[in-house]
Image (spheres, coloured by chain):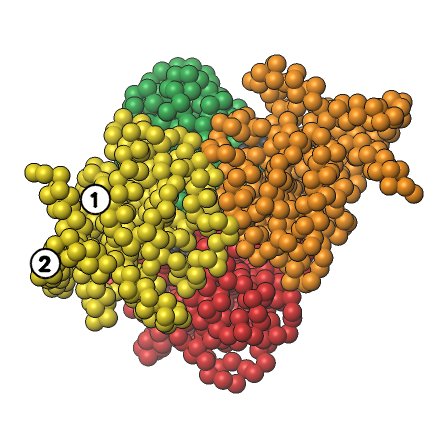
Chain colours: A green, B red, C yellow, D orange
Amino acid sequence: MAEVTLIEAGRLAAQQEMRRDPTVWVLGEDVARGGLWGQYKGFLDEFGTDRAVSTPISESTIMGAGLGAALVGTRPIIEMRIFDFVMCAMDELVNQIAKIRYMFGGQAKPAVVVRMPHGMWRNSAAQHSQMLEAWFAHLPGVIVVTPSTAEDTAGLLVQAIRSDDPVLFFDPKDLFGVRGNVAEQIEPIPFGVARQVTEGDAATVVSWSTAMPVAAKGVEMLAEEGVKVDLFDLRTIWPWDQAAVIASVKKTGLLLVVHEAVEVSGFGAEIIARVLDEVGTGVLKGAKRVAAPRIPIPFSPPLEAEVRLSPEKVMTAVKGLIAF
Amino acid sequence: MAEVTLIEAGRLAAQQEMRRDPTVWVLGEDVARGGLWGQYKGFLDEFGTDRAVSTPISESTIMGAGLGAALVGTRPIIEMRIFDFVMCAMDELVNQIAKIRYMFGGQAKPAVVVRMPHGMWRNSAAQHSQMLEAWFAHLPGVIVVTPSTAEDTAGLLVQAIRSDDPVLFFDPKDLFGVRGNVAEQIEPIPFGVARQVTEGDAATVVSWSTAMPVAAKGVEMLAEEGVKVDLFDLRTIWPWDQAAVIASVKKTGLLLVVHEAVEVSGFGAEIIARVLDEVGTGVLKGAKRVAAPRIPIPFSPPLEAEVRLSPEKVMTAVKGLIAF
Amino acid sequence: MSDAADNFRRLIDHYRTMARIRAFEETALSAHKAGEIPGPLHVSIGQEAVATGVCVNLRRGDRLTSNHRGHGHAIAKGAEPARMMAELFGRATGYCGGKGGSMHIADFSVGMLGANGVVAGGIPIACGAAQGLKLQKSDAIVTCMFGDGAVNRGPFLEGLNWAALYRLPVLFVCEDNGVAAFTRADSVTAGPGPLARAIACGVPAESVDGNDVIAVDAIIGSAVAEVRRGHGPRFVHAKTYRLMGHTSTDAAAWRDADEVSAARKRDPLIRFAAVLCERGVAAEALAEIVAEAQAEMVRARADALIAPWPEPAAAFNDVQDVGAAAWPK
Amino acid sequence: MSDAADNFRRLIDHYRTMARIRAFEETALSAHKAGEIPGPLHVSIGQEAVATGVCVNLRRGDRLTSNHRGHGHAIAKGAEPARMMAELFGRATGYCGGKGGSMHIADFSVGMLGANGVVAGGIPIACGAAQGLKLQKSDAIVTCMFGDGAVNRGPFLEGLNWAALYRLPVLFVCEDNGVAAFTRADSVTAGPGPLARAIACGVPAESVDGNDVIAVDAIIGSAVAEVRRGHGPRFVHAKTYRLMGHTSTDAAAWRDADEVSAARKRDPLIRFAAVLCERGVAAEALAEIVAEAQAEMVRARADALIAPWPEPAAAFNDVQDVGAAAWPK
Ligand SMILES: Cc1ncc(C[n+]2csc(CCOP(=O)(O)OP(=O)(O)O)c2C)c(N)n1
Ligand SMILES: Cc1ncc(C[n+]2csc(CCOP(=O)(O)OP(=O)(O)O)c2C)c(N)n1
Ligand SMILES: [Mg+2]
Ligand SMILES: [Mg+2]
């Protein structure tokens, strides 16, 4: 066990898998230098230029080459540096990676991991702060991983690298410094199993990725006022742990989803619609979202603050649900 | 008034606006030949090579050049031929067009219309059949237009061309042949105003684009059995007519959303979550979606049929809601 | 056997391959017209010499990425026309179990990594396949086929630079039929053309008459040898002509009639037949090859027509492992 | 006034522009270090001769697209440093009202169509702006600035082909500082380089020493004249050096110390000062220009520091007309 940061946990997981399996390799910009975030530090020295491939600024080809390499039996980790740049590689992701196995009747095994650090981070403005994970839940053919802790990052990345399905791995930029305990031998964490953080009858709160610590803080403040809720970190939004959330809602009758992404057409909507569909209005008494307004991310701190979540907003929303 | 097909209605609307305003022009592949769908037939002869621009297969630049041209005061219609190819131009659409006005504090006016024929059409398989309009409702900065009739196509396209906001205009491929009456002088139809198709107390049914005729047929079959519902064609999903839908749900208590796109994280989820948020479970007694499974679109007719909507599915869903 | 005999047999094989491609596509066209084949169909009639001259130089283990006009590439690479035809028909016995259709035929067992519905879509994939093969110390190479339209898409530049940079075993073949859909290549391609672009990206490049199968075979033969030797990527620009319309429903009536009739005279099958006759092959022998090819494809069509449709439930297979075989919610 | 005097004044103006860019960025760097500027900051210290030599040839009505390292481009194009600085500080008085920051500075009033956070993002935009201007029969031209990193992205090929095809009034300037973020340009760019690529896409191209402002001015002068005459696009490859790290927080310690110190000797300001002194300009006169520039930027910083923050409600403005000025649901 070592206490490490989230970004280091990811590095350890990738390193472990690359040591275990010679078909695993990584490609992306500045990988030779250890990646923009140090997530591949030392990889060049340990694995050489063939397995730690520093690439040109050619996102389409980074993504598409990763797929091609998977088709001949290797397991590439495709590093996108910052999520927003994946917009330069969407054909390769959406039309090729996500569909190839299906279109070819199962002949292709697109076993790639696409790492995409997402979300707000130090006032990076509109082109470097987006969270669009909901899009990929809507896209058949891919797994969508959205960890919020160092432990989960490690375990889910191991799982992702071993997965035969293409995995979209959203590293949470704003949480790269949070610490956790990572085992010597990192065990894979299965997709679709939520982590329950707190327990309570008052409401069900669901969150993931960068919104998690905010939700947790809000829940903690509620607990101090005696309001106890079930808080879940989904960890992966596709597949997502419907069983756990539904069981909780059957107990609490109230559902709050907290995510950093825009509220409109975000994944919170899916959770609410799905739970409602399953349990009906006899059980579900109220459902709300705490998420971002439908505006691009502004640069200036006081403007960015308008978009950011806060524990207070979470607290207010839960209380609103209960009062309703 | 002339009875014309939907695709011809769009052609007439674009032609009218190009005659009215010399800053309006169109660019895209095969525009010289009238566009893949004949939607620009005669434009080359009437408007010349500078305003009917046939382009290379360079989607990034088709999209980005459209934006650039808008920045100097013209109003381009950016033709994407088939929606799926917009994946080759997502940086230009998502990171540039949608954000530029905001990032630059209002200096930019990205007055573009992006036309993207979408949906299933004659067994075109996974890379030529996608519907991802929900993505763009989640994307701040753009209008999302999803007509289902010739009249609406004409009026909404006129509105789109005159709009200073960037408009994503989803032409419904499967409905290109449906006919409607288009006025000599086409009036703009405002965004965000639903068209009510039928009236009734039993339930509220909401749909748009290619799903509309299917929903309408299902509703008609229900009516024959004496079950009358409010049926709305949203026409635009951003903005969408929340007032109309909410007023109806307050009357009926039941909500069904019908769309061709994948159910998971589709725009139906947003409608349900939003309506629930507004009216609460005291009013909303049940809500369902009829939409596609989370699978790519298969080629073979019997497989494609699994993904397609049907009036029967709509009927069953409404009855399920009522029975519940 | 003597070199001459070997060579002679190779020529006859060329002719057979070309005849089979032609027969496959003519049969498919007529099946499409008869309503037996759904979806769009892009045939490469007139371009058979390229597919043939390229693939004859490849081993089974070599990989190939193709585009939307890829029947010829698949047949030349060794795919079975019967399973291809079944796929066009949307049947369970097709290569993709009916999920793909014409634009998504693949046969991984012969290294055919798939057609592609996106112009230039195969370029990055080919680069990565080569990189993966190199990483695994394989001596297989990757051939990447695309049209003149693809040279105006970004991945062309990115992929060629990439392959040159990592000295990857990729053979790029630009099958230039002079037209992209309904637009002349020269009206949308500025500068000196694909060859100069390839060279500017660091990939050695040569041109060839793509309607002359012997010339294609020769130039590809040396390019493949270079690539296999580890000398990095090579680019071949093969000039040819699309005799038919863009899709099966396009009559291509906008083209100059003189141009088309001139092109018909350069039909690679006719030209090559003349060459073979000159070299002493009896016209009957060629006719027999054609007749055999046609018979094979007629059989393929007949078999496809009675082949089973996929089970509806198959729609839910092979999406991804997670949530397999069920309506995923 | 005589040509010589004109020319002399032009040189002094060059020096002033370069000094102002340098002073702006040094001030911004120190403000960033002091925590006054949030977000990432990419400075172009060492590259001032390019921005200066390019923009001196442009009219106010000419447009310019820039990249993430665009302070110099903006200043040289005529933007006000005070409003730029306020933008870096995230203040209401900044060019974008604080919504953009360093990577998104724009000043449409002087034709500066904006920096861009996406490498090569400005290329298609520049092409379209030129097309729109041409459609409106304007005689304005568009200059498109990007780095060596951009030549490996698809839009480079697409945009150059496009501009050549439609003979658009675009001047492409590749500001080649030898490095993209933390990666050497030559380690990721195959083939003969940007110049050959431009030519292969049909755009006439020339190279210049980007650290020699007189040379840049001259070559751009004739390129601009060509472009403005309607002869279609031109491409200039300006070789320069990034003296600082990729962002303000990067020490660029991985670079060879000898290389950096050699580059420091080629610092365009130092080199140009020497030239001016040779031509008889007093060192004091140059020192005064530098001092004035520094004073201007110190004032800009001080003003920015006390400038008002944007109202929180401004976050909801300028998203789009529909649903303006409210939390959009
Ligand atoms: C990215 C993209 N844009 C547009 C299309 C539509 N389209 C299909 S084939 C084609 C023409 C391609 O021309 P070329 O590459 O020369 O191949 P050819 O059809 O001549 O064999 C076009 C534009 C597409 N499939 N993909
Ligand atoms: C499409 C894209 N990929 C990656 C990045 C991250 N990034 C920002 S600047 C940069 C280096 C750009 O190098 P170059 O174009 O030479 O400009 P320079 O920084 O040297 O001025 C990179 C990789 C980006 N902004 N956009
Ligand atoms: Mg072609
Ligand atoms: Mg650089």
- The residue depicted at 71 percent of the width and 49 percent of the height is D225
Above or below, C284 against D155 in this view is below
**Circle 1 crowding by C-alpha within 10 Å: few under 14, some 14–19, many from 20:** many
Pick the front one: C321 or B32 = B32
Measured as percent of width and height from the top left, residue A154 is found at 39, 25
Q: Secondary structure at mark 2?
A: loop
**Residue topped by disc 1:** C56
Please name the amino acid that badge 1 sits on.
Val
Image quarter where the N terminus of chain A lies is top left
Q: Is residue B121 left or right of residue B1?
A: left
Measured as percent of width and height from the top left, residue C321 is found at 27, 41
Q: Same chain for the residues at labels 1 and 2, yes or no? A: yes
Above or below, A48 against D74 in this view is above
- The residue depicted at 77 percent of the width and 49 percent of the height is D60
Measured as percent of width and height from the top left, residue D122 is found at 60, 45
Pick the front one: A28 or C251 = C251
Q: Is residue B100 left or right of residue D86?
A: left
Q: Secondary structure at mark 1?
A: loop
- The residue depicted at 28 percent of the width and 64 percent of the height is C265
**Residue topped by disc 2:** C282
Q: Is mark 1 within 8 Å of ligand 1?
A: no
Chain under disc 1: C
Whether residue D73 appears in this view of the structure is: no
Question: In the rendered image, which quarter is residue D69 located in?
Answer: top right
